[in-house]
Image: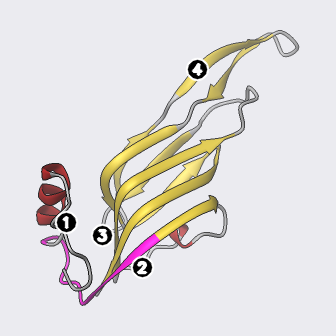
Amino acid sequence: MNTIDWKYASPEQINFWKHVRGLIAYTTITPLYYSGVFLGSEFLVYNAGKLYMALELNFNGATVPQPPPQYVETHNMADAANNYHSNQTLAWDVTAAAFKTTLNDINLKNIWFSRIVTAGYSSIMFNGYRLNV
């Protein structure tokens, strides 16, 4: 890696890095930490010249019951859906007399993506690296 020393990385992180570095011909690698509102963040926009390598990735949203769907979907370098994550609990809404879902946090480790699409989740915490071509 250009700027990162992996001597204190876990074996899992080293294996993850060996896999990710072969996915694109990157020229720069930038450490990146972001915690805040998902809407308007750089993770929404597809760019063929970037790949995110998340050592930690967390999502959360409203805890009030709401209609589905609620999910997080990561996309690969070709902007095709790569992974689909959902963590919700059914709750009976007595006012509407129907089931609604309550969001639970999504916590991921060692995952790569080029962009994220989400429904229902409003906050993100990313700790990892951005690889640029």
In reply to whether residue 128 is colored magenta, the answer given is no
Residue at 16% x, 72% y is 21
Categorize mark 4 by other alpha carbons within 10 Å: few (<14), some (14-19), many (20+): few
Which residue matches tag 3? 77
Q: Quadrant of the C terminus?
A: bottom left
| Nearest to the observer: residue 48 or residue 131 | 131
Q: Position of residue 14 (x, y in %)?
A: 14, 59
Above or below residue 47? Residue 85 is above
* Element under disc 4: strand
Which residue matches tag 2? 47
Dot 1 or dot 3, earlier in sequence: 1
Above or below residue 80? Residue 78 is below
Verify CB contact (< 8 Å) between mark 2 and mark 4: no
**Res. 66 mark:** none
| Nearest to the observer: residue 33 or residue 67 | 33
What amino acid is at disc 1? Val
Categorize mark 2 by other alpha carbons within 10 Å: few (<14), some (14-19), many (20+): some
Which residue matches tag 1? 20
Verify CB contact (< 8 Å) between mark 1 and mark 3: no
Which residue matches tag 4? 89
What amino acid is at disc 4? Thr
What amino acid is at disc 3? Met
Q: CA distance from mark 2 to mark 3?
A: 8 Å
Q: Position of residue 129 (x, y in %)?
A: 35, 71
Identify the magenta region: 22-32
* Element under disc 3: loop
Categorize mark 3 by other alpha carbons within 10 Å: few (<14), some (14-19), many (20+): many
Categorize mark 1 by other alpha carbons within 10 Å: few (<14), some (14-19), many (20+): some
Residue at 43% x, 39% y is 85
> Which of the 4 image quarters holds residue 61?
top right
